[in-house]
Structure formats: structure tokens, C-alpha cells
Amino acid sequence: MTITQPTETGQVYTLAEIHALSAVCRELGLRLHMDGARFANACAALGCSPADMTWRAGVDVLCFGGTKNGMAVGEAILFFDPVLAEDFDYRCKQAGQLASKMRYLAAPWIGMLDTGAWLTNAAHANACAQALAARVAGLPGIEPMFPVEANAVFLSAPPAVLDGLRARGGVSTPSSAAVRGSCSPGTPIPRGSTNWATTSQRSRRRRCRRRSAYALPPLTGEE
């Protein structure tokens, strides 16, 4: 079984929920894989150690994302059960995933982990998402679709506002299976996704686009 942490809606599984899911996997004879493209954001959000959220909670395999957290390229795959890692390198080669200079992809991880940048970057992205959600709150017709728990902000907005955002360079994400319970399939959804490089200036530009879509003046200090 695979879970995504954080989920496609930007929400985070709690440690208790991961423990419960892993217990079900054990009952059914399944293995638990965690898709952690934004794993660092989940660690920052929960304030827990990577071990608490993975092998201590019953996760068997983790894909630890680097490219969404400041690295140019590369993801780390961790097997907490050595048996599952048997022949994995050969399967990677067979699938065309073996780089001729793999050390250049692996080396940046040393800096990310040794300096703590992986967690600092993620905490910054999460804080920017919270700030963005707080500043657009109260705009007419704007409602958060999901709690902002990591680095993604999903919003519902009137069609006229969506058109205004697109006219100003904003991009709306068509609804996926993960959000169809909240809207019709294919409905455009404004999503603010912050990251390690998000600055207050970029956040202000996003807020100004949303306000201008309503023909509202910028907030004080955001002209």
C-alpha cells in the first residue's frame, strides 16, 4: 500500500494514522510504502523525527524527495527492511534509472542532511503557505478547501475570479481524484504551492493578483 505524505490536498497524516494504516497492512500481509516527495514538509509540520514517521510507525519503504526541497535533481529511496532492497539496483538499471555519474546526484544529500537544510527549507515553505492563507482569508467568495498543514494552499473561488486570475498570469489546477469529493471533476482550483525559495515579495505578488481579480486595491504596503 502507498500513502503520500503530505497528501495531494496538502494535509498531513498524523503519526497515529500512520501506525493505524501500518497495522492494517500487517493484518493483510501487505507492505507500506510512503511517497515522500514533500517528506521534509511533513516532518516540519508534525515536529517529529524522520524515524518516528517512518520505520517506527511501520513504514517499510520511503521515497525521500529532494527536488521539491531545494535540490536540482534526485530522490533518496530508503528500505527499512533489507530483504526488500534485494536486486533493487538491478531493477533500477533495467528501468533506465541508473545515472552514469550517480555520485553527482548523491553528493548534494550530504550537504542537505548535515547542515539541516532539508528541514529548514521545509519549515520556511510551510510558514509561507500559512502566511499566504492568512492574507487571502476574508476575500469575497474565497474559502480554503482543506486545512493548510504543509506547503500547499487550495482555494475555492467564484468563476469570475478564476478568470481574472488566469488573465493576470495565475494558473488553476484541474481537480483530481483527491479533491473530487469537494467539487466537480475538472473544476479549476487555485493552488498556492510555496517552497524553499518563496520570498515575501513573491507572496505579495500572489496576494495582489487575487485582490486585483476582485478589482480591490492592494493592501497597505503591497503596492
Image: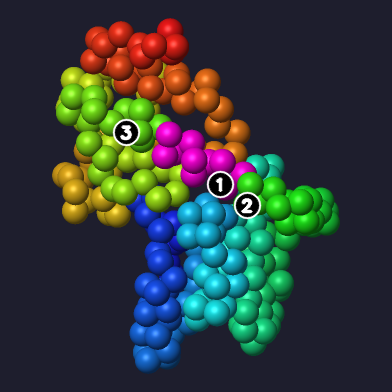
Residue 180 shown left or right of residue 75 in the figure: left
Rendered image quadrant of residue 113: bottom right
State which mark lies toward you, 3 or 2. 2
Q: State the residue in front, 97 or 125.
A: 125
Are the residues flagged by discs 2 and 1 in contact, CB closer than 8 Å?
yes
Kind of element beneath mark 3: strand
Predominant secondary structure, magenta span: helix
Q: Which residues are magenta?
A: 121-131
What residue appears at the point 64 percent right and 57 percent down from the top-left corner?
A: 75
For the residue carrying disc 1, how many other residues have a C-alpha within 10 Å: few (<14), some (14-19), or many (20+)? Answer: many
* Quadrant containing the C terminus in the rendered view: top left
What residue appears at the point 49 percent right and 44 percent down from the top-left corner?
A: 126
Residue at image mark 1? 123
Residue at image mark 2? 119
Residue 174 is one of the magenta-drawn residues: no
For the residue carrying disc 3, how many other residues have a C-alpha within 10 Å: few (<14), some (14-19), or many (20+)? Answer: many
Rendered image quadrant of residue 89: bottom right
Residue at image mark 3? 190
What residue appears at the point 44 percent right and 71 percent down from the top-left corner?
A: 15
Residue 115 shown left or right of residue 63 in the figure: right
State which mark lies toward you, 3 or 1. 1
Percent coordinates x, y for residue 14 in the rendering? 40, 66
For the residue carrying disc 2, how many other residues have a C-alpha within 10 Å: few (<14), some (14-19), or many (20+)? Answer: many
Amino acid at the residue labelled 3: Pro
Q: CA distance from mark 3 to mark 2?
A: 26 Å
Tag of residue 3: none
Figure label count? 3
Upstream in sequence: badge 3 or badge 1: 1
